[in-house]
Image: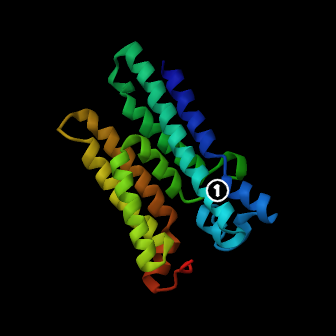
Amino acid sequence: MILTAIITIVAAYLIGSINFAVIFSKLFSKADVREAGSGNAGATNVLRTSGVLPGVLTFICDLLKGVVSSAIGLFMFSYLYTKTGSPAYVPIYGAYACGVACMIGHVFPVFFDFRGGKGVAVGAGVFFVCSPYAILIGLAVFVIFVLVTKIVSLASLAGTVATVVLGIVFNTKGDDVLLLPQIVMALSMGVIIFLKHTSNIKRIISGEEKKINSR
C-alpha cells in the first residue's frame, strides 16, 4: 500500500514536469520562453512573448495539471483508505500530497532541465479539488488586483494568500490532529509560490515591476 501511495505521488510530480509554457512557446513562436522576456516558464511570460492564445492555453493546461494530479491523489488515497482504514491514507491527504508533488514538478521539471514556472496556475488547480470555494474567492481576488494594479505578480500573490488562508479555514474545522498535515501541505504550496516570486516582490517594492496593458 505504501508503494502504491509513493507511485501515485511520483506520477503527480511527472505530470507537473510537463511544461506547457515551453511547449506552446516553441510551437507558436519557435522560441524557448525561458530565453525570452522574464525568463520564467509560465503563462504570463508566454502571454508577453508569444501572444494571447499560447498564454491562455498555457494557463489552462497548467491549471488542469493541478486538477488532474489532485484528483488522482484523491481517488487513489480513497481506495487505499477503504482497503486499510489507516489515517495515513485520508483521501484529502492524497489530493494535497499529489498537488504539492505536481507543483514541485512544475517548478523543477525533470523533462525540462529543472527550469520551470512559479506554480500559481498549478496551485489553483490543486485547490479546485481540495477547496473549491477557497479558489473561487482567490481567483476573484486575483482578477480584482489585475484590474486595479495591472501587475500580474502582485495579483497572483494576493490570490495565493486568500486561497491558502481560506483553504485552511474551510478544510480544517475542529481540533483533530489529522488536520495538521492539510495545513502544512496547503501552506507549503503558498510558500513555494512566494519563494518563486522573490524577484517580483523586490521589483514591486521598488516600483519596477512590469504591468500588462489594458487589453
Disc 1 on helix, strand or loop? helix
**Residue at image coords 52%, 45%:** 66
Q: Position of residue 4 (x, y in %)?
A: 53, 22
48 left or right of 148 in image: right
Q: Position of residue 189 (x, y in %)?
A: 43, 51
**Residue at image coords 54%, 50%:** 63
**Residue at image coords 47%, 51%:** 123
Quadrant of image for the C terminus? bottom right
Q: Position of residue 22 (x, y in %)?
A: 71, 57
Mark 1, other Cα within 10 Å: few <14 / some 14–19 / many ≥20: some
Residue 66 visible to the viewer: yes
Within the image, what quadrant is residue 44 found in? bottom right
Q: Position of residue 188 (x, y in %)?
A: 41, 50
Within the image, what quadrant is residue 161 found in? bottom left
Residue 31 visible to the viewer: no
**Residue at image coords 63%, 56%:** 58
Please tell me whether residue 116 is drawn above or below residue 181 in the rendered image. Answer: below
Tag 1 residue: 57
> Which amino acid type corresponds to the residue marked 1 in the rendered image?
Leu
162 left or right of 109 in image: left
Name the residue nearer the viewer: 110 or 212: 212
Name the residue nearer the viewer: 166 or 197: 166
Specify the farthest residue to the right. Answer: 30
